[in-house]
Amino acid sequence: MNTFVRSLAVLAGLAGLAVSLMAVLTHRSYGEQDRCVAEAPALEGGSIGYELLDLAGREVWATRDWTPTAFATFSLPATWLLWRKNDPRVGLADRGEFLQSPGCERGTYTHMRAFDRRFVQVAELIDLREPSDESGLIRRAAVEKYHVLHFDAGRTVRVLTSPAGERFIEVSRTLLRRTYTPTLPTGWTLTEHHLSEPLRVELLGRVSVLRMDNEDAFQGPLTDAVPLGLDTAALHDTP
């Protein structure tokens, strides 16, 4: 009898695992989702953003409805397979807005209610391992997003330039950043630009996200039409 009960328990466990794997393969919806509705996300009003990454569905979900302490102690349930927490991010723009969720029309967004919080899908993961540099100092990923950032006149912004001349603007830092200047690979430069006029940066469609060794995040590449002012100072330059 004990052997029979144990066999049933094993079968039940295997069945549960099969269901979980099927959910991943078919991209099961988690939480309560409303897709592509005309309801703009409430992401303004705070500088710290929190994200959950759905690696199976390749979706990035954002909210401001957390505190650093509560987010640090939060753990995703075991049933949320291939979901991960991103580190809390401090936005550096003065204002910003998402024009749409990926896969939706302009002005419509996909929302999710989970863990007594409301999230919005802000990006779709395209490639998590884009090539960046041979030294491995920069982690580069590609996402689809529709994000507009506004920097006020009088601000100073930092721009990362690749050996090929691609420019990436700093958009966020980690909450617990300990080093202001990251280590740069050979041929990369980091400069500060003082803005004499307001700056609007459009990150639309395929966007590269570059994470430095101090967890600062730069995004782009910027088009040549993005003006950055005349006052620039080199922070770090590699030959």
Image (cartoon, rainbow, N blue to C red):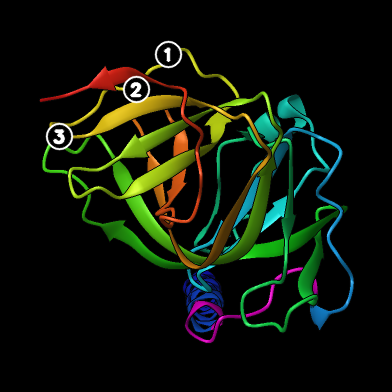
Q: In the image, which disc is placed on residue 182?
A: 2
Q: Which mark is residue 187?
A: 3
- Whether the magenta-drawn stretch holds residue 24 is answered as yes
Residue 110: % across, % down:
76, 73
First in sequence: mark 2 or mark 3?
A: 2
From the viewer's perspective, is 65 left or right of 189? right
Q: Position of residue 53 (x, y in %)?
A: 56, 57
Mark pair 2, 1: CA separation: 7 Å
Q: Position of residue 45 (x, y in %)?
A: 86, 38
Q: Which residues are magenta?
A: 23-33
Q: Residue at x 53, y 81 (%)?
A: 15
Secondary-structure class at tag 2: loop
Query: Is 99 left, or right, of 16 in this rendering?
Result: right
- The image's mark for residue 179 is 1
User: How far apart, in angstroms, are the residues tagged by discs 2 and 3?
Assistant: 14 Å
Image x and y of residue 186, in percent: 13, 31
Q: Is 223 left or right of 107, judged from the image as shown?
A: left
Res. 38 image quadrant:
bottom right
Q: Quadrant of residue 206?
A: bottom left
Q: Determine the CA span between mark 1 and mark 3.
A: 21 Å
Q: Is residue 35 visible?
A: yes
Tag 2: residue type? Pro
**Pointer 2 and pointer 1: residues touching (CB < 8 Å)?**
yes
